[in-house]
Image (cartoon, rainbow, N blue to C red):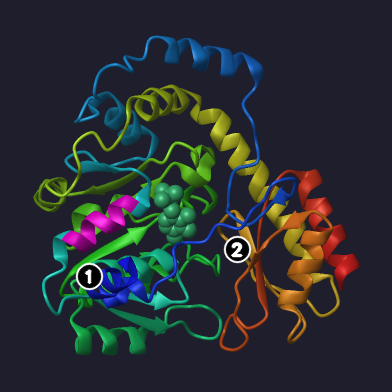
Amino acid sequence: MSQDRIAKLIRPEIAALSAYHVPPARGLIKLDAMENPYRWPPEMVDAWLATLRDAEINRYPDPAAGALKDKLRTAMDVPAGMDILLGNGSDEIIQMLAMALARPGAGILAPEPSFVMYRMIATLCGMDYTGVPLAADFALDLPATLAAIERQRPALLFIAYPNNPTGNLFARADVEAVIQAAPGLVVIDEAYAPFAGGESFMADLGRFDNLVVMRTVSKMGLAGLRLGLLAGSAEWLSEFDKLRLPYNINVLTQATAEFALEYGDMFEEQAAAICAERAALFDALTGLEGVEAFRSDANFILFRTPPGRAAELHAAMRERGVLVKNIGATDGPLADCLRVTVALPAENAAFLAALKAAL
Ligand SMILES: *Cc1c(COP(=O)(O)O)cnc(C)c1O
């Protein structure tokens, strides 16, 4: 009975979707989600718990999260004069932006392949979505992108810098040309900034009036917190702030992030260790017969397996206790590709051993 009602009431584009799927990882070495593998030293955990003891969990959180924003401003080099908007993960920020700009006929444009949430949130918000294929070397196809911008006039344009799942940084001049050509808002999504050797558009915020920069604490080591931020001018951000549900950053997240950001050096050391492991892992993958690894400026590596074997190798590695991401493409630029998170040396070694055995 309820089926009839559901079919009548749920928007067809929602009915056609599947919920975001997170594969079970219990007991596996989890290398599918770009998490930081390092745990905190025990003294730091004790100090953190002491902070939480004072958290006023009976009260609503500070809606403006002023103290946390100040720390983020310093940690992420947000230029003076720019504002910060916080989200429950950058995913929530993408949703706020889309909801604010989703007039009938308005669209989102992004390079393809890129972060899957851009397309998913466009669908959720009833916006058109245009994916512009990347060049064969995963660079921006600038002529195609400019032509698509001219044709679609997107309200919102996302560029992941570095890109997920390819791992590369686009040429800065190409990104600037896109920002200049775009009639709408351009979001540079810098989720992987800690691994990108300082490459960022944060310092360019004042140069373009249609540019905002998105960051998250997830990939640097706080994925469990769910905290992302958007940096940009007060004119833009005050509009998006109207869509933010009150108290979207909870008391525990605010207290924990404020605490953790005092340990910036530790997170930087972890990122440096991950970048060193990334180089070793890239060389090891490149040395494997039949495997093509792609250079990465993020904390993961995309690699191509022998034709037609991605699903089988993915399953065989899981049997051996290692979970990577199967991109799931049988043709196109990501055909036969898997993506692995760079993790602890022992975990990376276990991954390589599992892959070699499976090959
Ligand atoms: C992982 C990822 C995010 C997600 O960030 P959260 O803050 O955890 O929601 C955003 N953008 C890109 C490109 C990502 O890969």
Q: Do we see residue 8 in this rendering?
A: yes
Pair 1/2: label in front: 1
Q: Is residue 175 left or right of residue 231?
A: right
Residue 225: image location, x then y, percent:
44, 36
* Stretch in magenta: 92-99
Q: Is residue 124 left or right of residue 300?
A: left
Magenta stretch, main secondary structure, is helix
Look at the numbered disc 2 and say if its residue's Cβ is closer than 8 Å to ligand 1. no
Badge 2 element:
loop
Residue 26: image location, x then y, percent:
69, 46
Residue contact between numbered discs 1 and 2, judged by CB atoms under 8 Å: no
Please tell me whether residue 118 is drawn above or below residue 111 in the rendered image: above
Q: Do we see residue 127 in this rendering?
A: no
Residue 277: image location, x then y, percent:
72, 50
Q: In the picture, which quadrant includes the N terminus?
A: bottom left
What residue would you read off at disc 2? 296
User: Residue 9 bears which disc, if any?
Assistant: 1
User: Residue 57 bears which disc, if any?
Assistant: none
Q: Is residue 139 left or right of residue 109?
A: right
Count of numbered badges drawn on the protein: 2
